[in-house]
Image (cartoon, rainbow, N blue to C red):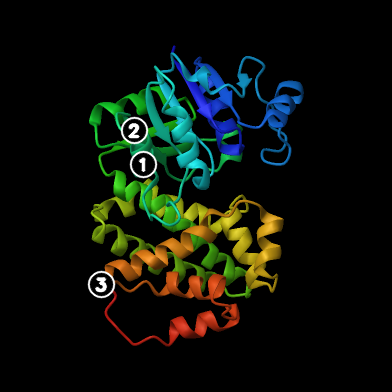
């Protein structure tokens, strides 16, 4: 079987390590934090990020990034804000195989997709992205999950599919990296808006409308940026959008619910932890401006999160927009 190194020992990194180990692979889990490595080596559990799930004893945990040597696949499973730093550290290593990024987001400032960031830091790397409806808690517990591996190279996406697949994790392939990455980033913003709905006490009709129109906005921006529209009707689009907008596991939805219920934004961020959609909302808003397209849900999220708009005014403002055709 293959050697797989996971860079990032958060919930998703641990879940993928457990899945890969269960398929018989030689798995190494890396963290830059010595205290985290020590905790996982001693207790094999991270109660804060993946409560009740034990890391198998056969998975090596290390803070030495040179451990990637000999890997068939190196998975980057850090927050999006750490992608450039981790890719830079990986660039000085050798023999790390293909790079599979599982973080979802865009780079602040540059507005680059994360695969573009990795390519800038490691120009010769063979890169794939893995995305789809896949909460770490469920993957770690072996619940049935489907995701998609996308790459500009069919060979690279095939390698990612072959090695990352397991009895409980089914991996499809795609040649649309742009669409898969944008789906993973933008759905987090729509999930925050879905949390607003629930926090405000709106009903199922409202949530369904928000998800549907949110998907239309995601696809609209994606096509302008070179993605294929049909990608947004697959696992990395509607699949990930539905699960993130409706699940108790979703930190983006949980954050939005708190804000919709009246919790101050700074307090909600502190209580929930990493909320990728908070950062993505600003970047998506800037991309909409750059490409001169309408994204009313994204715009309303941005107004609440960055312009001090009262969240209670969002539903009426969306409903009172000028009438138009659905498509």
Q: Which image quadrant is residue 171 in?
A: top left
Horizontally, residue 119 falls left or right of residue 33, namely left
Q: Which residue is mark 2?
A: 127
Of 63 and 192, which appears nearest the observer? 63
- Callout 2 touching callout 1 (CB < 8 Å): yes
Callout 1: SS:
helix
- Residue 159 position by quadrant: top left
Mark before the other along the chain sequence, 2 or 1: 1
Q: Position of residue 290 (x, y in %)?
A: 31, 67
Identity of the residue drawn at 60% across and 54% down: 251
**In the rendered image of this protein, does residue 204 appear above or below residue 269?**
below
Classify mark 1: residues with Cα within 10 Å, few (<14), some (14-19) or many (20+).
Answer: many
CA separation, marks 1 and 3?
A: 31 Å
Q: Which residue is mark 1?
A: 115
Q: In the image, is residue 124 above or below residue 218? A: above
Image quadrant occupied by the N terminus: top left
Residue at disc 3, secondary structure:
loop
Q: Is residue 236 visible?
A: yes
Give the alpha-carbon distance from disc 2 to disc 3, as whole Å. Answer: 34 Å
> For numbered disc 2, what is the local secondary structure?
strand
Task: Answer with mark 2 or mark 3, whichever residue precedes in sequence.
Answer: 2
**Residue density around tag 2, few if under 14, some if 14–19, many if 20 or more, within 10 Å:** many
The structure residue drawn at horizontal position 34% and vertical position 39%, both measured from the top left corner, is 120
Q: How far from the left and from the top, in percent, is residue 100?
A: 40, 32
Which of discs 2 and 3 lies nearer the camera? The answer is: 2
Q: How many marks?
A: 3
Query: To which residue does mark 3 refer?
Result: 327
């Amino acid at each position: 079987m293959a050697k797989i190194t996971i860079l990032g020992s958060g919930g998703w990194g641990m879940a993928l390590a457990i899945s890969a180990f269960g398929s018989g692979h030689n798995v190494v889990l890396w963290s830059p934090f010595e205290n985290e490595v020590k905790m996982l080596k001693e207790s094999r559990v991270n109660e804060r990020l993946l409560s009740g799930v034990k890391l198998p004893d056969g998975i090596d945990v290390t803070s030495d990034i040179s451990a990637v040597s000999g890997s068939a696949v190196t998975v980057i499973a850090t927050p999006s804000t750490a992608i450039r730093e981790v890719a830079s550290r990986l660039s000085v290593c050798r023999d790390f195989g293909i790079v599979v990024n599982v973080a979802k987001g865009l780079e602040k400032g540059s507005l680059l997709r994360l695969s573009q960031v990795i390519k800038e830091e490691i120009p010769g790397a063979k890169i794939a992205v893995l995305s789809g409806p896949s909460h770490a808690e469920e993957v770690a517990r072996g619940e049935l999950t489907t995701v998609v591996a996308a790459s500009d190279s069919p060979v690279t996406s095939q390698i990612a599919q072959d090695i990352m697949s397991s009895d409980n994790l089914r991996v499809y392939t795609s040649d649309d990296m742009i669409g898969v990455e944008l789906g993973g980033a933008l759905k987090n913003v729509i999930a925050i808006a879905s949390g607003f709905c629930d926090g405000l006490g709106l009903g199922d009709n409202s949530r369904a409308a928000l998800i549907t129109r949110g998907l239309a906005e995601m696809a609209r921006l994606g096509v302008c940026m070179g993605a294929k529209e049909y990608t947004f009707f697959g696992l990395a689009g509607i699949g990930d959008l539905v699960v993130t907008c409706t699940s108790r596991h979703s930190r983006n939805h949980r954050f939005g619910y708190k804000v919709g219920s009246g919790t101050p934004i700074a307090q909600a961020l502190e209580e929930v932890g990493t909320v990728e959609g908070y950062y993505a909302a600003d970047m998506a808003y800037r991309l909409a401006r750059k490409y001169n397209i309408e994204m009313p849900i994204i715009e309303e999220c941005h107004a609440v999160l960055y312009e001090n708009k009262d969240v209670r005014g969002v539903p009426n403002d969306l409903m009172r927009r000028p009438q138009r055709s659905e498509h």
